Image (tube, rainbow, N blue to C red):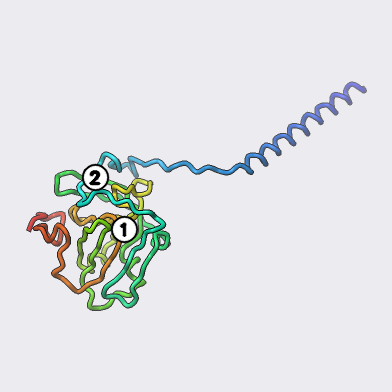
Amino acid sequence: MKWRIRINLLLLFVCMFTSVFSWMSVIKTSANEVKELQPVEIREYEGEKLSSSKTGFRENSIRGPQYVKKEDYRLEIIGLVKSPLTYTYDEVLTYDQYKKVVTLNCVEGWSAAVLWEGVLVRDVIANAGVLPQARVVIFYAYDGYSTSFPLEYILDNDIIMAHKMNEIALPPERGFPFALVAEEKWGYKWIKWISKIELSDDVNYRGYWESRGYANTGDLDKSFLN
């Protein structure tokens, strides 16, 4: 009889020791700092193949990739607005986020299908109070590049100003901090490294390539040359 009691006590002790050890392990694990790993670029989205951010593009910017520090970034909204605005990078990201697969088609003959993610341009400019006389939206970049669109194109379409591609942060070569996803337009309208957005009434404004003979509309279903 005594040996049975001893065995039961021994089993009870083992169970209690195991429970305490497990509890201490949980406490130790939860106390450790969780290390965040770098996100991995996806190459397929909802059954659609995506182009690589590294090999799916050709470098054809006017002054090479621009390397802008996030903490130094400022986006200006100027021109025909009630209240000019200046955003930090994080302030831009407070707007609702949207993602969509859109293909960039370059006049050089190559294309890249990408899952873009960012904010809508019309949301970003809305708080500045667009004045009635504004008819054109001009985008400027850190490298001196510029291009423009009719105001209705920006307001009537979900035009994304992207900060991510294929679920990773936009690389500097692709336009970090922000690049324009100009749907249904040739690639030269997809301005990168956006630094300033101007609301204007100058319907004759011509951007970098437009002033060098490229079509101002940049419509994908038409020739890119005037």
Where does label 2 land, which residue?
112
* Quadrant in the picture for residue 123: bottom left
Q: Quadrant of residue 125?
A: bottom left
| Disc assigned to residue 161 | 1
Residue at 44 percent of width and 42 percent of height: 38
Observer-nearest of 215 and 62: 62
Q: Quadrant of the N terminus?
A: top right
Q: Are marks 2 and 1 in contact (CB under 8 Å)?
A: no
* Percent of width and height locating residue 154: 26, 65
Q: CA distance from mark 2 to mark 1?
A: 17 Å
Please name the residue shown 17% across and 72% down the image. 202
Position of 196 compared to 62: left or right? right
Q: Given the current orientation, which residue lies at the most extreme right position?
A: 2
Q: Amino acid at mark 1?
A: Met
Q: Quadrant of the C terminus?
A: bottom left
Q: Is residue 1 shown above or below 76? A: above
Q: Earlier in the sequence, mark 2 or mark 1?
A: 2
Q: Is residue 186 above or below residue 76?
A: above
Residue 94 drawn at (x, y percent): 42, 62
Q: Secondary structure at mark 2?
A: strand
How many marks on residues? 2
Q: Is any part of residue 194 visible from this angle? A: yes
Picture coordinates of residue 131, whole percent (x, y)? 27, 77
Label 1 crowd bin: few (<14), some (14–19), many (20+), radius 10 Å: many
Residue 49 seen from this side: no
Question: Residue drawn at (25%, 56%), measured in percent from left and top?
Answer: 143
Under circle 1, the secondary element is: strand
Indicate left or right for 32 with 89 as reference. Answer: right
Name the one closer to the observer, 17 or 83: 83
